[in-house]
Image: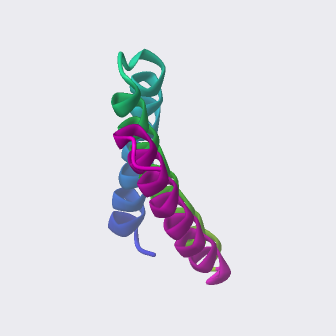
């Protein structure tokens, strides 16, 4: 990577870390369970982005598969919790 690409990559990585921290604070402070579920979903999306950043940095394509499986499990988990909160499960 050239210098500009590396700077942009690092900025995006730190922005994703900041978003993860902000979502974690929202998870702790959320007044309702819906707010906490939304914050948890946001944290998983940020985690998936960080896994992709690590895959790009390390040059390992297997981490992208891990991120994909994590995304699918996260989606199913959010759907299950939403159904439970709705009262349909």
- Up the image or down, 60 lies above or below 21; here it is below
Single out the residue that lies furthest toward the front. Answer: 88
x then y, percent, for residue 22: 39, 29
Is 79 magenta? The answer is yes
x then y, percent, for residue 30: 38, 20
Residue occupying the point 48% across, 53% down: 80
Is 75 magenta? The answer is yes
Span colored in magenta = 60-89
Q: Quadrant of the N terminus?
A: bottom left
1 and 66: which one is in front? 66
x then y, percent, for residue 75: 45, 61
Residue 45 position by quadrant: bottom left
Single out the residue that lies furthest toward the bottom. Answer: 61
25 and 59: which one is in front? 25
Residue occupying the point 36% across, 21% down: 32
The reply, left or right, for residue 59 in relation to residue 77 is right
81 and 52: which one is in front? 81
- Up the image or down, 75 lies above or below 13; here it is below
Judge whether residue 52 can be spotted in this image.
no
| Scheme by which the image is coloured | rainbow
Residue occupying the point 42% across, 56% down: 79
Judge whether residue 40 can be spotted in this image.
yes
- Up the image or down, 71 lies above or below 46; here it is below
x then y, percent, for residue 2: 41, 73
The reply, left or right, for residue 20 in relation to residue 4 is right
């Amino acid at each position: 990577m050239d210098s500009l690409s590396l700077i942009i990559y690092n900025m995006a990585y730190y922005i994703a870390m900041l978003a993860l921290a902000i979502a974690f604070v929202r998870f702790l402070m959320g007044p309702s369970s819906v707010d906490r579920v939304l914050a948890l979903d946001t944290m998983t999306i940020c985690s998936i982005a960080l896994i992709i950043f690590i895959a790009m940095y390390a040059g390992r394509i297997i981490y992208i598969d891990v991120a994909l499986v994590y995304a699918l499990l996260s989606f199913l988990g959010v759907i299950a919790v939403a159904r439970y909160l709705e009262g349909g499960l």
